[in-house]
Structure formats: C-alpha cells, structure tokens
Image (cartoon, rainbow, N blue to C red):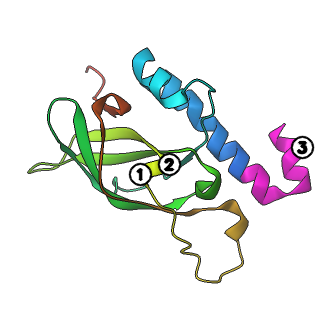
Amino acid sequence: MVVEVARGCPSTGWALCRTAAHVLQVCTVFDETAQDELLGADGDFRSACTVAPVAPVGVARPDGPDHVVLDGTWPYSSGAPCSTHYVGQTLRAGDPPGPPVLFVAPRSVWTAPDDWRGALGLRGTGSQAARQPHVRGPRPASSTASRPPS
C-alpha cells in the first residue's frame, strides 16, 4: 500500500511508511498493558520518531514510582504533523546520565514547530522537530534498554 501511495506523492508515502511502522516497535518492546493504553479502543497509532545517530536527545527524570518527566526537542521527526504519538530515545537523568530510555508520548503533550523556515526540499515529509518541555508521562510508556548478556 505504501508503494502505491508513494507513486502518487513520494512525501506522503514517506510519512505513511515512517508513522505506521512504529506500531511494530511499540508492540515488541512494551507490555500488553502499555500497548492497550497507547493503541486505545480504536487502534489508531501513527508515530513520528527521530533516530539519534550519535546520542539520544533530551532527558528523562523519574517522578515518583509511576511517572517520568521528559524534556527535550527531537529534530527531524518524520510525519510529525499527522502523528498521534511520538516514539523517542533519551537518557535517564543522572550523573552520569543513562541508561538509554525508549519512550512513547501521546500527541497531546508535544508540539511540532514548523522549523523548515521556508525551505522547500523535503518539507512534505513533515520532518519537523518534536518539542516536549517538561512533560510528565506514565512510566509504563517507557522502556529502559539493557545490554545483552556477555
């Protein structure tokens, strides 16, 4: 289906492919309770995402036993304007920071500023930043990465 959409409009195909694919990540990494909460009754889940090439952006601070506070701006989040969620990576706050955290945030807690500044290029991909300023979210929607056993 994505190929057919992309034949008509490559940028729409890109956004569809990027936002639809993250449901696989959510259903693989998060437990059933978190999946039920994230997918909701209608199963509508389209997620923007940024893959941080060098290091995660932003920070996650624990806030009580059941919540985490996310703070950061994740650039080039393809499909941001049409997404219902954001899947991101960050580091748990501390000295030193870490371990890496994978999180999912509903659309209601982040903004997608138009940061293309008038450039044409790949504007249609919706690869805008995802800004989450001190957003408090449930801990079940975050997963701490761990190293495989040696």
Residue 90 located left or right of residue 12 = left
The nearer-to-camera label among 3 and 2 is 2
- Percent position (x, y) of residue 78? 60, 56
Residue most toward the left?
95
* Residue 4: assigned label: 3
Above or below residue 131? Residue 13 is above
- Residue 41: which quarter of the image? top right
| Distance (Cα) linking label 1 and label 3 | 33 Å
Above or below residue 132? Residue 146 is above
Residue 31 located left or right of residue 25 = left
Residue at image coords 70%, 43%: 17
Residue 82 located left or right of residue 115 = right
Name the amino acid type tagged 1: Val
Number of numbered callouts drawn: 3
Above or below residue 120? Residue 145 is above
Dot 2: element: helix
| Depth order, front residue of 66/23 | 66
Disc 1 or 3, which lies upstream in sequence?
Answer: 3
| Residue beneath disc 2 | 107
Q: In this view of the protein, can residue 31 be seen by the observer?
A: no
Dot 1: element: helix
Q: Are marks 2 and 1 in contact (CB under 8 Å)?
A: yes
Which stretch appears magenta? 1-14
